[in-house]
Image (spheres, rainbow, N blue to C red):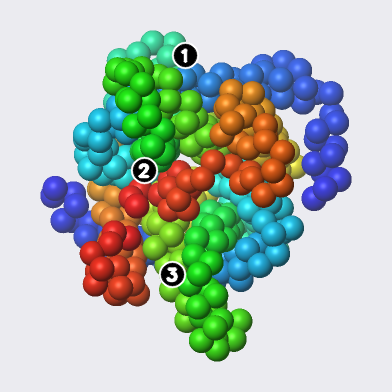
Amino acid sequence: MIPGIVHWLTDPANWSGPDGVPTRLFEHVWYCALALVVASLVAVPVGLWIGHTGRGRFFAVNLAGAARAIPSLGLLYVLVLWLFPKLAGDSAFLVPTLIVLVVLAIPPIMAGAYAGVEGVDPEARDAARGMGMTGGQVLRKVEVPCALPLVFSGLRSATLQVVGTATIAAVAGTGGLGRYLIDGQKVQDFPQMASGALIVALLALGLDLLLALVQRGVVSPGLTGRSTRRGNTPVDVEIDPAGRTVDAPAR
Amino acid sequence: MTWFIDHLDDVQARTLQHVYLAGLPLVIGLLIALPLGWLARRYPVLYAPFTAGFGLLYTIPSLALFVLLPGLLGTKILDPVNVVVAMTLYTVALLVRTVADGLGAVPEDVQQSATAMGYTRVKRFFAIELPLAVPVISAGLRVAAVSNVSIVSVAAVLGIPQLGLFFTDGFARAFYDPLFVGIIACVVLALVFDVIIVLATRALTPWLRATGDRA
């Protein structure tokens, strides 16, 4: 198995042209990035609003739970059948894939955002109010910065799922790294499938690492304890453990 | 609706297969994750490598795992065992961190009280720490259950019988009925799993109801 993968990965023929790894990798990243940006634009504001006001929490939790239960493969097929005659060219494949990935990415991102805001130390919030900050200022200057670790945790969880699920989009005719799995399976080309799987896993890892680095840069050092020299400072913000699993639907 | 009634036998058989493929790994995965999570909590050196390391399993796309496992296990590509193993790996990936965090959330004074009352380490784990960690572990298990139900359907691309076959059938014939039946059956199944876990958690944590605390 290993020699087959090494042979496939080192074959220059697999690294150029429309089927080459760079092209497929770019397509894959492009779908995922687009889906994650759209999902974040929807889920982060809604999640912050729910966390800040405490309203609509029940509705959001249940909607997110239901969205999570929808099988991506089934949704993809329905959307392709429904939208394909209505759309032209590449978008006929791209739009259904994007919708599936956005539906997949919204629940964890939204859960991270509202759990993050809810988990903010009430004393910090009260102190901000006491200083005369308006609701919007409290949200912007206190709640959002304090919620960032969990917002990132939700985003990273969504990224892992989106990168993995984007592979099944290939069954509907889109590009991306899933092509190696689907095309390889048709002709029983095991090294091709294994190489494709390996590249997807590495991509997921690489993106997670990238987001971890961004998180390090963006999250205030006062929250992570990196600025203090006390040895027993918690390595992360103190979040109650039920909330630490960002995916935890309810505490 | 008529299609659904005409194919009730199929729906029933595939639902049962789906329950088996998604449910069994939850049980096995939990049994594997418990000792691993305990180790990660008992030896702090292991916490980061265990939670991150097993979390890595989740980065492998499901389709890839279904395709690669036969090569690693020596099974046939259509063997349901591949799906059970793959889903178990995902369950473990999600639960090791949850178990470790759940055990870590048991208050220090509770543990000391137990020790002072003469509990040995083993007895303390089963009688005190594990029960108190149930609400956190259950939250993780609910996520794993819902995601398992969805991921299992991907195995239909390879032709392994379960509810996902309705998706491939429906798509191949451009016929919506089986697609919708399959999606609804998956969502209902996920809901049923969720309700079972919630009820089991309630039964295992009677003190939460007694004190009016939320799980």
The crowding category of the residue bearing disc 2, from other C-alpha atoms within 10 Å (few below 14, some 14 to 19, many at least 20), is many
Q: Is residue A30 above or below residue A63?
A: above
The residue tagged with tag 2: helix, strand or loop? Answer: helix
Q: What type is the residue that disc 1 sits on?
A: Asp
Rendered position, A199 above or below A98: below
Q: Check the residue under mark 2 and report the chain it is in.
A: A
Q: Residue furthest top?
A: A88
Residue B154: % across, % down: 47, 47
Numbered disc in front, either 1 or 3: 3
Q: Residues within 10 Å of mark 1 (few under 14, many from 20)?
A: few
Q: Position of residue A162 (x, y in %)?
A: 51, 33
Sequence-wise first label, 2 or 1: 2
Disc sitting over residue B105 in the figure: none
Question: How many callouts does the rendering have?
Answer: 3
Q: Residue at x 69, y 43 (%)?
A: A230
What chain does mark 3 sit on? B
Q: Indicate the quadrant where residue B100 lies.
A: bottom right
Q: Which mark is residue B132?
A: 3
| Residue type of the residue flagged with mark 2 | Arg
Q: Give me the disc on residue A68.
A: 2
Q: Say whether residue B142 is visible.
A: yes
- Chain letter behind tag 1: A
The x, y position of residue A202, in whole percent, is: 70, 36
Q: Amino acid at mark 3?
A: Leu
In front: B46, or A128?
A: A128
Q: Residue at x 72, y 38 (%)?
A: A229
Q: Would you name the residue on which mark 1 appears?
A: A90
